[in-house]
Image (cartoon, grey):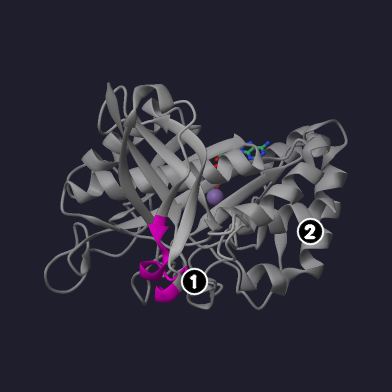
Amino acid sequence: MVIKAEYIWLDGTQPTARLRSKTKIMNFVDKETPPMWGFDGSSTNQATGDNSDCVLKPIRTVPDPLRGADDVLVLCEVLQSGGEPHPTNTRSQLEPVALRHEDKDAWFGWEQEYTMFKGSRPLGWPEQGYPAPQGPFYCGVGADEVFGREIVEEHMDACLAAGLTLSGINAEVMPGQWEFQIGPVSPLEGSDELHLARYLLYRIAEQYGVSISLNPKPVRGDWNGAGCHTNFSTEEMRSPGGKAVIEEAIRKLESRHHLHIENYGDGIEQRLTGKHETCSYKEFKYGNSDRGASIRIPVVVQTEGRGYFEDRRPCANIDPYVVARLLLETCCD
Ligand code: ADP
Ligand code: MN
Ligand code: MN
Ligand code: MN
């Protein structure tokens, strides 16, 4: 018996990599350990035409909820033809850092915001002009307030069927904008899952003629941008006395603010303006329950003295492998 395996990888597009995928028909018996495979790196900004072969190395295989019970999605990392990690392979840069800090038992919770587009306008926006000002749309209900719920519901079911650690969804502040959450889960697994969840979202929306944008500021003006708030904790932070550990991590984050900003998504200056529930990228602020801060300390840390913190700076278009690596290096090294 043969099955369909969708091999998924990150390409070499600058400044923001894109997901690519292609299908391999393979024998059912190979499902547990899908083989390496090749692709034309000259078409993905990963090689030159005269030396175009790149290699897909399977990382994680999950059931494919879109095709069928036996079919699979195969998330891959990219190797050069000689077998060494490709320079665009940011997972291979996270891996040693994650292993070095395995004893810290770090958890990541990713809040992926995104915007649905129909043609050149966000889904649900009028042909001409703008919708009513922001206010009623966040967690809204009703055909005049939320747009694209059928896609969101299908995506949620697909993530669960694929075994991803999806922890919730909600409609966002700007009409046509939504969020899903992954985690809390370990650095490598969580980052892998975020990419798989994005892939499923693109594929499902495709069927509705809707495209998904991770642009951090999809509409200029008085409209919320799209972020990927990153919630982070270590075992120490989650244990009694954890609040002090969180505060120490925040001081370290402050000292490397600009390095993080540079790696938190192209277009971050447009999103982190100091308005629309953001802190300006030029400043570093933290605060209890403060959604105008760079780092928010959730209320549970106040009441219980332990827990996690929320880095509000990452944009919707981040590479989670890069963000996870930086957070581990800054907070745990
Ligand atoms: P917000 O109030 O900022 O919108 P959400 O409920 O959307 O928050 O997301 C919170 C995220 O924090 C979830 O992804 C959840 O998995 C994650 N999370 C909860 N506890 C922890 C923890 N101890 N460490 C890391 N992440 C956590
Ligand atoms: Mn959220
Ligand atoms: Mn949000
Ligand atoms: Mn948040």
The vertical placement of 152 against 40, above or below, is above
Q: Residues within 10 Å of mark 2 (few under 14, many from 20)?
A: many
Residue at the spot 18% in from the left edge and 50% down from the top edge: 144
Return the x and y of residue 203 as percentages of the image width and height.
27, 46
Amino acid type indicated by mark 2: Thr
Residue at the spot 57% in from the left edge and 41% down from the top edge: 190
Return the x and y of residue 268 as percentages of the image width and height.
53, 72
Confirm whether residue 62 shows in the render. yes
On the rendered image, what quadrant is the C terminus found in?
bottom right
Where does label 2 land, which residue?
Answer: 330
Residue 93: assigned label: none
Indicate whether residue 280 is drawn in magenta: no
- Mark 2 falls on what kind of element? helix
Mark in front: 2 vs 1: 2
**Badge 2 or badge 1: first in the primary sequence:** 1
Q: Nearer the viewer, residue 253 or 14?
A: 14
Return the x and y of residue 104 as percentages of the image width and height.
81, 38
Amino acid type indicated by mark 1: Arg
Left or right: 119 with respect to 68? left
Q: Nearer the viewer, residue 193 or 167?
A: 193
Magenta segment, which residues?
39-50
Where does label 1 land, which residue?
Answer: 271
